[in-house]
Image (cartoon, rainbow, N blue to C red):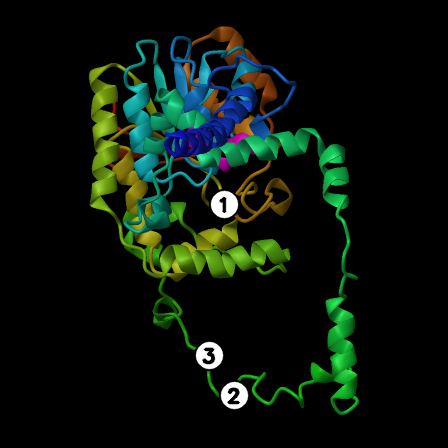
Amino acid sequence: MSKISNTARFYGFICIITFLFGILPIIFNFIIDPYEINKVVDIGIEKKKISEKAHYPLWKVAHYPEETSDVIILGDSRARSLRDKYWHQLGLTGAYNFAYGGATVYEIYDTFQIIKHNKNLKTLVIGIQLRSLDVNFKNGLNRVPEAIRLNENPLQYYSNWFVSKISYKNLQNKYKAEFKRLSDFKPSLFTPANAREIIISEAIINEGKTLENLLEIEVCTNCILPEHIAPSTHPSFYENDTYYFADNLGIWKSLWTPIHIERELPIKFQKQVKRNAASDWRKFKFSEQFWSYLVEISTWCDQNYIKLIFIIPPTIVEMQNRVIDYGHGELDHDFRKRLTTLGLVIDFDFDNHLTRDLDRFTDAYHFDYKTAKLIVGEIAQLTNDNPDAILLAQKRRKDIICPITSSDILHIVSDNFTEVREGKACRIWSSQNVH
């Protein structure tokens, strides 16, 4: 009996330890609450910077103010740049930016499923561009279902190891000095080894060579690519030198004059123009499934009297040229025309003074915050009829002016179905199909 009792006590002790070990992360996450789902305990941690970047949808879902939002912005990091505060500064306090860094069409569509229940919604703004319609874009990434699940199920949220990791990062960021002292306190039983000194000493023993000697070209017999091999050329460059995609566009040709620019780009920009553009366009395949999602969103907006606006964000002109280099220039044009059948299209991604000014961009894809504020000001004039907000937006205007009024229009191209009005660094594409 005593033997059984001892065994029972032992297993009971193990169960208690296991339970405590399992409940510790739950308690930890409840206290830190990195995505501010409960907001019960306030230990003075500013969580947004770390938590939002780690899981954009979870942060945005947890903070979505459905009862007050009348303007919602969806899209990727460029749409996310059109931050809430820029709208609020114009007096449009009902604007909520529901865009995510690296968002896919899957994520835009699933977020739409959330906001479509909003009875206050009046305007839906979607940041979109042709490359997002690639069937393989980001391998079909979709973080929204997980965000919804964690937001709706507190037990899963508090017991989630990813949430624990973000809790720890927030805590570490808050108490940097304390964590540094803790990490510096390491009992030292062995003398730390200096890897560089070991390599150099071994190199000296080995035929008297230093590390620098070992890196010389003569030592590495296969370090240089074979000579006299011509570089391969992308198929799109085999076209006749006089050919340009816009030659086939008839009256629309004037919108797409050839982009001629020669300058040395910063290294980060240069890598994106070469490497990222190749990844975007080399195997690009337009997804009709993704397009059907946009059609569904448009139909719902039309049925519920919601104003739908598509934003095509600016990229530097070198990046625009890469779309053409890979043979997708005409498709990019047709994409805009096709979008006009779904909603109003505000286009900033063409050759103009904005997209030629590198100082307005943080990289080849992303514009700076000053440009973002100007873009918000232009969109705001199309999303509401609040005279005070419109007046503030017009006062904010500088060198980005969308053709909203007749005095803003610099150029018009139209046929029986589509009209393009051009202002300063901004075009508005519209169709008679838009209500």
Residue indicated by mark 3: 231
Give the magenta part as a residue range: 50-58
- Residue 55 in the magenta stretch? The answer is yes
- In the rendering, at what x and y percent does residue 392 appear? 57, 14
**Most foreground residue, 116 or 388:** 116
**Most foreground residue, 124 or 106:** 106
**Most foreground residue, 368 or 2:** 2
**Most foreground residue, 132 or 185:** 185
> Which marked residue is nearer to the observer: mark 2 or mark 1?
2
Q: Amino acid at mark 1?
A: Thr
- Helix, strand or loop at disc 3? loop
Mark 3 crowdedness (10 Å alpha carbons): few <14, some 14-19, many ≥20: few
At 64% from the left edge and 43% from the top edge, which residue is drawn? 359
Q: In terms of sequence position, does the residue under pointer 1 or pointer 3 come before the other?
A: 3
Residue indicated by mark 1: 315
- In the rendering, at what x and y percent does residue 200 appear? 77, 77
- Residue 210 in the magenta stretch? The answer is no
- In the rendering, at what x and y percent does residue 22 appear? 45, 31
